[in-house]
Image (cartoon, grey):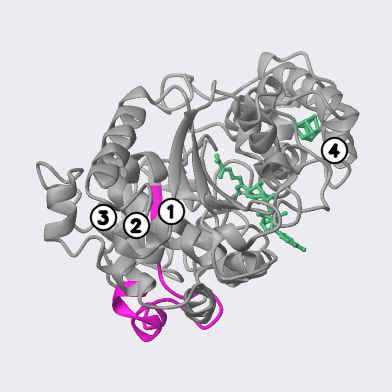
Amino acid sequence: MTLTPVLSRYWDHPRSWTLETYRDHGGYDGLAAALARTPDEVIGLVKDAGLRGRGGAGFPTGVKWSFIPQDGPTPADQSVPHYLVVNADESEPGTCKDMPLLMATPHALVEGMIIAAYAIRCARAFVYLRGEVVPVLRRLQTAVAEAYDAGYLGTDVLGSGFDLELVVHAGAGAYICGEETALLDSLEGRRGQPRLRPPFPAVAGLYAGPTVVNNVESIASVPSILANGVDWFRSMGSEKSPGFTLYSLSGHVERPGQYEAPLGITLRELLTYAGGVRAGHELKFWTPGGSSTPIFTAEHLDVPLDYEGVAAAGSMLGTKALQIFDETTCVVRAVRRWSEFYAHESCGKCTPCREGTYWLVQILARMEEGTASEDDLQKLLDVADSILGKSFCALGDGASSPIVSSVRFFREEYLEHVRGGGCPFDPHASTLMA
Ligand code: L3W
Ligand code: SF4
């Protein structure tokens, strides 16, 4: 498969982020096409295109929009206000696609949000952005100001009678606020902790109103569908996973970065564009969708990277964060680093995750430091099992998945740590795990 740059097609333009450059490349044509249709027709188009959520779960975007109850054709007709919230709290380890997108072409998100808000009849939309990324915040705020000045936001958007206010909110740097209901709590001014679902946000979300929560890349993909049509979008990818997407390649690869390609491309193909695994080394293991997904090995190089292909091979496409590790990397050390991250980011609301992630770190540390006993491998799996499927939100599952899968593929390496008195790897060889 060849690369299909759509979102990233002029990221190297020296002023890619300005409204002028965006319009020079067809920007806001999708909005004009949307406003020429009824909101229901816009939802129908996005449904027909088969766009699926790019934030991890792959839920069909148009279907999610259609869950929002409708009392009439405009925001003013609704008995309770509807909201659109964009999840820009990108922080899954290895995931680096939403922030580059917002730095390069923030108007793609702004335009997509106006179309989505029009479709679900909401008059207020929010972006919840990771607070640490101050340059991204500034760029997005600048784009929003430009959009207000140009009449794309505010009252009577482009003379359509549709009003939209767009607020950019910076979070305070908690991974759990990327979970959609914790994000909503945080946006409302509370401590960000997941809410019980159902009700899903589409029924009771922000301020208990029907709310669509979508990922940045999902919403930024919408204008191209409006501008180019359903058939164009479906000409890429597969029947159930249509379209293009951003894959983030990082780690032991010659040219790390974002590669935009049809869903269903393989890692083997992506590596040809990224210059391969670093020279003189070979692939040992990799993540298909960030550190929350079961790991893959070299035997998975030809797995189609779409929702069905990755699931059939035993993992999840997730955020399409492909972290590549070569043979110099100790798998136990890599998993220990991820576990430390989850233990630190666990919000503490439920016992399996709060206590379990702590114990995962303790056992992995013993293995690395040479104080583990023969029982510890089974204990590690038992603790992971007591988290998996028994936690309140997906963070717990995410913490367990790399452990269980890495033991499946590298049991001997774990045993070598236990029997050989600690980590047999040179800590300086990997370059990633120091
Ligand atoms: C209405 C129903 N809405 C589902 C909606 C739901 C949500 C979407 C998907 O987790 C995954 C997670 C991480 N009526 C509905 C409904 N919905 N049924 O559909 O829901 P769900 O539960 O399948 O997934 P989720 O809670 O969105 C996302 C994985 O992604 N992940 C993490 C990514 C992290 C980031 C980041 O850093 N910001 O994206 C990576 O793999 O483990 O499994 O909107 O409301 N009946
Ligand atoms: Fe909080 Fe972890 Fe429980 Fe999620 S699984 S609610 S992050 S303690």
Secondary structure of residue under mark 4: helix
- Start-end of magenta stretch: 225-248
Location of mark 2 (residue) = 157
User: Which numbered marker is on residue 163?
Assistant: 1
Q: Is mark 4 within 8 Å of ligand 2?
A: yes
Secondary structure of residue under mark 1: loop
Location of mark 4 (residue) = 387
Q: Is residue 348 left or right of residue 171?
A: right
Q: Earlier in the sequence, mark 1 or mark 4?
A: 1
Secondary structure of residue under mark 3: loop
Q: Position of residue 256 (x, y in %)?
A: 31, 43
Amino acid type, residue under disc 4 in the picture = Ile
Amino acid type, residue under disc 3 in the picture = Ser
Query: Dots 1 and 2: beta carbons under 8 Å?
Result: yes
Q: Position of residue 51 (x, y in %)?
A: 50, 70
Q: For ligand 2, which image quadrant applies?
A: top right
Task: Classify 10 Å Cα crowding around label 2: few (below 14), some (14-19), many (20 and above).
Answer: many
